[in-house]
Image (cartoon, rainbow, N blue to C red):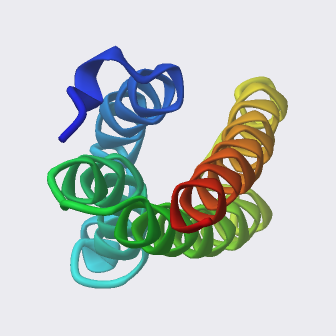
Amino acid sequence: MRDFRKILVWEKSHKLTLQLYKITSSFPKDELYGLTSQIRRAAGSIPANIAEGCGRNTQTELARFIHIAGGSASELEYHLILAHDLGYIESSIYPELNKSINEIKRMLNGFEKTVQFNAKKSNV
């Protein structure tokens, strides 16, 4: 079992989630159960899946939850594009959000590959 709070990609995704909660609080009220909810759910799913995977007993299970976090990151990336295109996210803020989500996706990909390698190595 790992301490997820010591994993850099968890920390970055948690900070992004906090930032997106603040940003989405200014979205139109009619989006509360739509795009606001989708962005918050997808963002929160990334660090939550990392945390859940760290609580599992095997490297294989950890890799599976990191993979799920990666799917949530891609979903979030699309929702941010949509929110920007609808004018809900300012053009001055969007590039930094896009950069953050893409950095998180790259980190998750590398983390998943490392965990998968370690899982295979321990099964030999």
Relative to 27, is 8 on the left or the right? right
Relative to 98, is 39 on the left or the right? left
The vertical placement of 106 against 66, above or below, is: above
Relative to 59, is 55 on the left or the right? left
Image coordinates for residue 83, horizontal then vertical, percent:
63, 63
Q: Nearer the viewer, residue 46 or 82?
A: 46
Dividing the image into 4 quarters, which one contains the N terminus? Answer: top left
Residue at image point 52% right, 70% down: 72
Image coordinates for residue 2, horizontal then vertical, percent:
24, 33
The vertical placement of 114 against 112, above or below, is: above
Dividing the image into 4 quarters, which one contains the C terminus? Answer: bottom right
Q: Quadrant of residue 87?
A: bottom right
The vertical placement of 26 against 120, above or below, is: above
Residue at image point 70% right, 62% down: 77
Image coordinates for residue 99, horizontal then vertical, percent:
81, 32
The vertical placement of 55 against 65, above or below, is: above
Identify the residue at the far front of this view: 124
Number of labels in the image equals: 0
Image coordinates for residue 95, horizontal then vertical, percent:
84, 32
Relative to 3, is 117 on the left or the right? right
Q: Quadrant of residue 92?
A: top right
Q: Nearer the viewer, residue 45 or 39?
A: 45
